[in-house]
Image (spheres, rainbow, N blue to C red):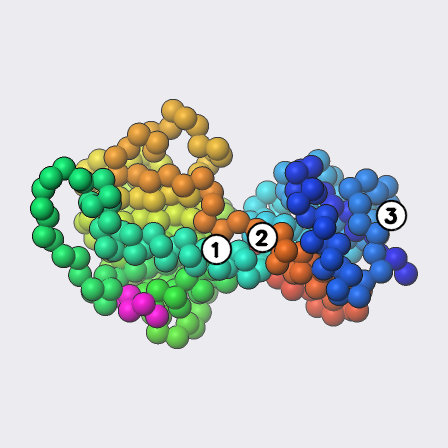
Amino acid sequence: MTVNILFAAKAERWDSYRTPLTAALRAAGIDFDLRTDFAPADVDYIVYAPNSTVQDFTPYTRLRAVLNLWAGVEDVVDNDTLHVPLARMVDHGLTQGMIEWVTGHVLRHHLEMDKHLFGQDGVWRTHVPPLAQDRPVTILGMGELGRACAATLAGLGFPVTGWGRTARTVPDVTTCHGANGLDAALSQAQILVLLLPDTPATANILSADTLAMLPRGAHILNPGRGTLIDDTDLLAALDSGHIARATLDVFRTEPLPANHPYWAHPKVTVTPHIASATRETSASRVIAENIRRGEAGEPFLNLVDRSLGY
C-alpha cells in the first residue's frame, strides 16, 4: 500500500529536500507518494516545518505522525488540533554542527582570542590564559545536544558541569539537576553554554538573579533559544563588567532587528542562527526511518513529550 507523505514547509525547503528525501525513502524500502499538495484526508505522514501554512491538523483524519524538520518544537507542541505523535529532528548533522559551534566558541573565549583579533594596536600583551583544566564550563540543558557538547569539551580537558531538569549520566561530566543544582552549576561557570529547550519553565532562566550567581568575568554562549535570556538584564550585566562577553546565536526576534543593542555592543558577538542547521541528506534519513518504523508498527524515534514541551 502506498504511503502518502505531505511535505509542509516553505517552497525553498521543498526544493532542497525533494531529492534527498526521495532517495532516503527509496533506500528504506517504502512505497510512497511524496507531494506538497495532497487532500488532507489522504495524508498518512506530514514532514513538517512549524512556519508552514499547515496550522490546523483537524482535516488530516488518517494522519499517523508529524515529523518535524527542526530540533525545536515550541511553535507546534501546543497546537490543540494535533493529536498524533510528534517527532522532533535529532540527527547527526544537527549534533555535529552544534558540537563544532560550541567547541569553537568555547575555545575562542577560553583562549581570549578576541584580544588579539581585535586588539591590533601595537601593544605587546603577554597575558597567558589558563589551561582548559582550570576553566570550568557549565552547560544548561543535557539533552542530545548538551550531552554531546559536554563530552567533547570534557575530552579537551575542561571541567564540565551539566544541568537539566532530570539527572543525566555523562562520562567525565559533573551533572546537576533541580533548582538547587542550578545554583551550584552557575556558581562555578567561567564559561556558560545555554542549550535548553524553549518552555515556560526555561523562559528567562538567565535573568538578573541568575546572572549574579555567575563568577565575575564569566562568558556566555547561547546557541539554544532566544527566550532563555532576559536581554535587558544581560546588557546590564555586560555594562557593569560582571559578564565579560556574550556570543549569541538565537534571539526572540529573528532576524535580529538592525537597531537591536546587541549589534553595536562591544562585548557581544552575534551569529545568525547558524550553530546547528538541519542538513537535508542526514535529516531525510531520519525522517525515512521514522516512516519505516510507523509502517512496521515499531516505536517512533525522538517523540516529543507534550507535557514537557520537548
**SS for dot 3:** helix
Residue depicted at 56% across the width and 46% down the height: 74
Q: Which residue is mark 3?
A: 42
Disc 2 versus disc 1: distance between alpha carbons? 9 Å
Quarter assignment of residue 134: bottom left
Residue flagged by tag 2: what amino acid is it? Arg
**SS for dot 2:** loop
Mark 2 or mark 1: name the one nearer the start of the chain.
1
- Quick check: can you spot residue 160? yes
Q: Nearer the viewer, mark 1 or mark 3?
A: 1
Q: Quadrant of the C terminus?
A: bottom right
Return the x and y of residue 229 as percentages of the image width and height.
38, 42
Quarter assignment of residue 138: bottom left
Q: Would you say 220 lies left or right of 254 here?
A: left
Q: Which residue is mark 2?
A: 279
Q: Which residue is mark 1?
A: 97
Mark 1 or mark 3: name the one nearer the start of the chain.
3
Residue flagged by tag 1: what amino acid is it? Gly
Q: Which residues are magenta?
A: 155-159
Q: Residues within 10 Å of mark 3 (few under 14, many from 20)?
A: some
Q: Residue furthest bottom?
A: 171
Q: Nearer the viewer, residue 140 or 22?
A: 22
* Membership of 157 in magenta stretch: yes
Return the x and y of residue 241 as percentages of the image width and height.
19, 41
**SS for dot 1:** helix
Return the x and y of residue 83 as percentages of the image width and height.
73, 51
Return the x and y of residue 177 as percentages of the image width and height.
39, 64
Q: Nearer the viewer, residue 208 or 62?
A: 62
Q: Main SS of the magenta segment?
A: loop
Q: Is 57 placed above or below 153 here?
A: above
